[in-house]
Every structure is written in structure tokens, then in C-alpha cells.
Amino acid sequence: MTSKNATLGTLRELNARSVLGALVDNGRLSRAEVARRLGMAKPTANRAIEALAAAGLVRESSPPDSGPHYGAIYYEPALGVGHVLGIDVGAQFVRGALADLGGAILARYDHPRGGDDIPSLLAAVSAVRTHLPAPADAGADGIVGTVVAMAGVVDPAAGRLLLSSEPSLEGHPVVEDLATVLTGPLAVDNDVNLAALGELARGAGQNEGDFAFLSVGTGVGSGLILDGRLRRGARGAAGEVDYPGHRPFATHSPAADALQQLVEDRYGAAAKNRAGSRDEAVPENPARLFEAARAGWPLAVRVVREEAQRIAGTIAMIALVVDVPLVVLGGGIGLNGGIMLDPIRDRLAQLVPYPPRVEISRLGDAATLVGAVTVAAREAWPRIVTARLAATSPSSSNAATQGVA
């Protein structure tokens, strides 16, 4: 192919990517709507749609139920042409989700960690991958991308995990390790950042341009969305408000459940001594502790209220810097925040002049998985477009110019 035709072929592909992106974002559009939304000439939009249809990447769709259509033909993306995996490495479980290229989760599987060493981690990840194969009868390209979520910051140059909450993983080349059990394109990202992206895509942040996701669990971390985009900071460490060696907001033990450790380390023996009887002792199981607080056990109520004060302090720090209108709570403790919402809000009103709204994640423990498959799908589309257009393009260089206005 000549240089001129190579350039035209590149433009053809870029046009196709833009059109497909508009369809993925909006679900279905007519040809005229595609051209209008992209500011693209109608003939150019039409040729891009035809190229995508020939490649099996878009298909005709029924028109919307409301409004006049005037015979317009609508198109939608073929979301089943490939599948992606999201994997969330937690303190006790490795959770996995299989999704289509629209980010809709089709299946989920949770596997116990079994240990905090690298071999145990890789065994659990491999088990998740085995339990979540791409549908054999979907005519799909298989697993076209995987995003793994981990606590900490991944050095993009070396693929090493830094600021990890697990000493056994600190500084480890996790990308290289995971590639031994996961095939195809692979990315590793911070779990809380991915949770924030999950809330932006399908959770409480869908209609918010600015918000923070605060995870309170085995550690405390935040993900920041501003102007509809994730903000990572200069070195990817934005939101690491609870890192090893400097924990102003939480006492931490990576091997213990967060609330159990909170009870044992912050209040444990002293709280139980104050209780005066075995029956009044604070339950060390986190779920039971919240149940006890909801039932009105005085000491459990005090423990939960003290944690609410600490969470409010962390939210205040975020709000004073970026003034977000919304903070979404997640993580093992944060998801139990319903009982803490009133004291958190009361304390915030005392700490900041413009306290943000505080909500519990609508996605529960799936926020990180939703973010992971959303990112995996977004990164997979360009690769699929390139491969499929190349496979369906006419072999002559002159034919390559037909897809560009």
C-alpha cells in the first residue's frame, strides 16, 4: 500500500472507531444521529457504518419506542463479538467477572485466596479464569482483554506493585507474574480507582461529573473523578490516604479483617474491660458488630460512631481540597455505612463549610469488578476494530480509499 493509501486507510479506521464509540456510548443511533453527534459528514458516517457492519461489529437495531423515526435505520454495537474479564484481588477472595464489550457482567465467580504469597494468589486467579470461559456458542473472539484490580500502585514502567497493603506483594512484578496464568492483553490497576470508574459507569456517579469514591476496608483509599475523568496524580498515587508507614486514619493489619482489627487494635481489650461483662463485649466479627450496633448495644454503637468520626475526617480532607459534591462509600466497612451516615454527615457539617453528599455504593462489592470490565472493554475495542477491518478490507489499495470521504 502506498503512503497516501496507508494514510487513507488509517483515516478510515479512525472514522470507524469514532462511529463505534458513539454507538457503544449511546446504545443505538440512526445514521443521521451518528453524523450529528460526531460532527461528521453523512457520507463519511454512512461508509464507516457499512464498514463496521461488514466486519460484524454493528448491526441493525429496532428504533426507540418514543418519538418519530421517519423510516430511519438504527444501528447498535455487536457487544458479543468478544468478552473481557475483570478480576479483583481482595484480602480474602479473588473475585472475577465475565462481561461483554458493553461492560455488562454475564457471570461472576469468587475464589478464596488461600494465602497471601504469590503462588497462592496465582492459583486463585487461575481458578477464577478457569471458571469464567467465554461462551463457546456466541461466535465470539474469546477473551479479548483482562484487567486485574489490586490494592496499591502499579509502576507502569516495571509492572511492579508499590504501596501495597500486603508486604508479601510489595515491589513484586505482578504484571509479569499474572501473565503466567492469564492469556491475552492484560492490565493491572489500583482497585479503588477501578471502583470509582465502576461507580461512574453504572453506579451512584453515573450522573455526576465530580465525585470521590472512598473505600474503607482493610485499608482506606479514595478514587477521584473530576470532569468525568479519573484523576491519578503525577505518579499514580492520588487517593492513597492510608499507605504503609503513614496511616493517620486507620490502624491496619493486612492479614486481619478490617473491623475485627479495628475492634482489637483501637478498642479491643480496653473496650471489653469497660464493658463490664462478657455479654456486653464488642463482637469481633464485623457483620455481627454492625448487627449489634443496629440492635442498640451501647458499646457496639460507640465503636461504630467512632469509626464514623474517622471516616468523616477523611472525607473532610478530600472535600477541602477538591470540593466534590458527592462521596460514595464502599469497602468492607463502608458498605455497612448506613448506620454511620447520620453521624458522618453531622460531623462533616462541623468540619467543612460545604459538606458533600455521602452515599453508599449501589454496586456493593462489585464496584471494582464493574470498573475493571468497563476499562477492559474500552481498551479492547480499538484492537478488535483494527483486526476485523483488516480482515474484511478489500486487498487492493484502491478499495481501501472507499471508506473515507
Image: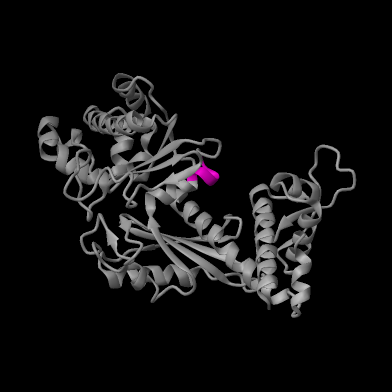
Residue in front for this viewpoint, 99 or 131? 99
Which image quarter: residue 360? top left
Asked if residue 170 is positioned above or below residue 342 in the image, the reply reads below
Check the image and name the residue furthest to the right: 71
Q: Is residue 337 left or right of residue 29?
A: left
Residue 371 appears at what percent x and percent y? 48, 52
Residue in front for this viewpoint, 237 or 328? 237
Asked if residue 299 is positioned above or below residue 74 in the image, the reply reads above
Q: Is residue 186 left or right of residue 34?
A: left
Residue 244 appears at what percent x and percent y? 20, 50
Asked whether the viewer can see residue 156, the reply is yes
The question of residue 372 being in magenta is answered with no
Asked if residue 268 is positioned above or below residue 350 in the image, the reply reads below
Q: Is residue 245 left or right of residue 65?
A: left
Q: Residue at x 47, y 72 (%)?
A: 130
Q: Residue at x 73, y 64 (%)?
A: 52
Residue 147 appears at what percent x and percent y? 45, 62
Asked whether the viewer can see residue 139, the reply is no
* Quadrant of image for the C terminus: bottom right
Q: Residue at x 54, y 45 (%)?
A: 202
Q: Residue at x 78, y 75 (%)?
A: 398
Prevailing secondary structure of the magenta residues = helix
The question of residue 200 being in magenta is answered with yes
Q: Is residue 287 left or right of residue 84?
A: left
Residue 331 appears at what percent x and percent y? 36, 45
> Which residues make up the magenta segment?
199-203
* Quadrant of image for the N terminus: bottom right
